[in-house]
Image (cartoon, rainbow, N blue to C red):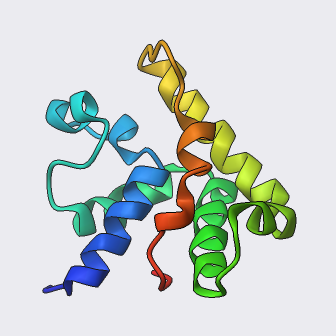
Amino acid sequence: MNHSAHDTHLFRFTANMLALWGVCGNAKCRRARACRGDVCACVARKALLVPEGAREGVKAMIEGRQDGAKFDAVQDRAYDDVEALLNWRETVERAIGASKPLARKLLARTRNAPTSAA
């Protein structure tokens, strides 16, 4: 299936926010801490390995961006889901031995999130 550049950007954002590289069998992805393969296929296959709350957290962030909301407003609206996402990312980062978990820092930079939902 062909995806537009915007769709690919949205899938890449989703894959990165869900830290799918942490559950990927591709060593290149784990080393880069980002999808280095077909990101659209990766999201389709691997997203279900992530807790539902974390997936909902990414969805809330994308929808919030569509509405023009700042991160704090999204977190207020979907606190449990955003916290589930933060906790998932921290779990993945600890599992791979990250010396400085990036989850909260990365989520604070979501002002560049894509503007349409998956």
Give the percent coordinates (x, y) of residue 12: 32, 62
Image quadrant occupied by the N terminus: bottom left
Image quadrant occupied by the C terminus: bottom left
Left or right relative to 16: residue 65: right
- The correct choice, above or below, for 30 with respect to 51 in the image is above
Left or right relative to 110: residue 85: right
Give the percent coordinates (x, y) of residue 76: 86, 63
Give the percent coordinates (x, y) of residue 91: 58, 29
Left or right relative to 82: residue 118: left
Q: Quadrant of residue 11?
A: bottom left
- The correct choice, above or below, for 96 with respect to 10 in the image is above
Residue occupying the point 48% across, 82% down: 115
Left or right relative to 30: residue 64: right
Residue occupying the point 80% across, 68% down: 73
Residue occupying the point 50% across, 31% down: 92
Residue occupying the point 82% across, 55% down: 80
